[in-house]
Amino acid sequence: MQSNNEPEQESAAGAQEIRPLSTEQVNLTLSGQTMRITCRKGEAAAMIRAQNMVNDKILELRKMAPGLSMEKIALLASLDFCHELNQKTLQLKDINDTLESRVRRLAELLKGNKG
């Protein structure tokens, strides 16, 4: 999600150029509350998918703890999403470390075969 006046930095030729971002408006409804947001052109579908994920998480939490206020449910949903993101980030780091190690090992093997 971006504001309308953030600059885009690089042109197709690779030269630094400042021009406004291409944006679009999308209406999102989260837990019955509709809001209009600005996002980069082409990101509306992803924002709608995110809206659906948030609404699903809110429904899940409401079923688990029906007495909680909407504010606490929203905080728990945010905490849960951040936890999931952190877990995925750690998994990706582990995968990246493994790949780097294997590429280094492969490079060593290839270097050994040349000599």
Image (cartoon, helix red, strand yellow):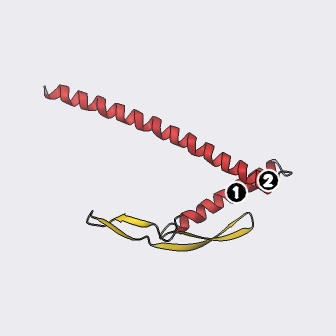
Q: CA distance from mark 2 to mark 1?
A: 10 Å
Q: Given the current orientation, which residue lies at the most extreme left position?
A: 115
Question: Within 10 Å of the Cα at label 2, are there few (<14), some (14-19), or many (20+) other Cα atoms?
Answer: some
Nearer to me, 16 or 23: 16
Q: Which residue is rendered at x = 25% and y = 32% of the image?
A: 107
Tell me the tag on residue 39.
Answer: none
Using residue 100 as the reference point, say whether residue 43 is left or right of it: right
Earlier residue among tags 2 and 1: 1
Q: Label 1 crowding class (10 Å Cα cut-off): few <14, some 14-19, many 20+?
A: some
Figure check: 78 above or below 103: below
What residue sits 42% from the left and 67% below the top? 7
Q: Quadrant of the N terminus?
A: bottom right
Secondary structure beneath dot 1 equals: helix
Residue 28 position in % (x across, y down): 64, 68
- Image height check: is 6 above or below 110? below
Which residue is pictured at 38% across the width and 36% down the height?
99
The spot of residue 63 in percent (x, y) is 80, 51
Would you say 16 lies left or right of 69 here?
Answer: left
Q: Secondary structure at mark 2?
A: helix
Horizontal and vertical percent position of residue 86: 57, 42
Q: Name the mark on residue 62.
A: 2
Left or right: residue 37 versus residue 30 is: left
Name the side, left or right, on which 48 lies relative to 55: left
Q: Amino acid at mark 2?
A: Arg
The residue beneath circle 1 is: 56
Please name the residue shown 35% across and 31% down the image.
101
Q: Position of residue 24 (x, y in %)?
A: 52, 74
> At label 1, which amino acid type do we have?
Asp
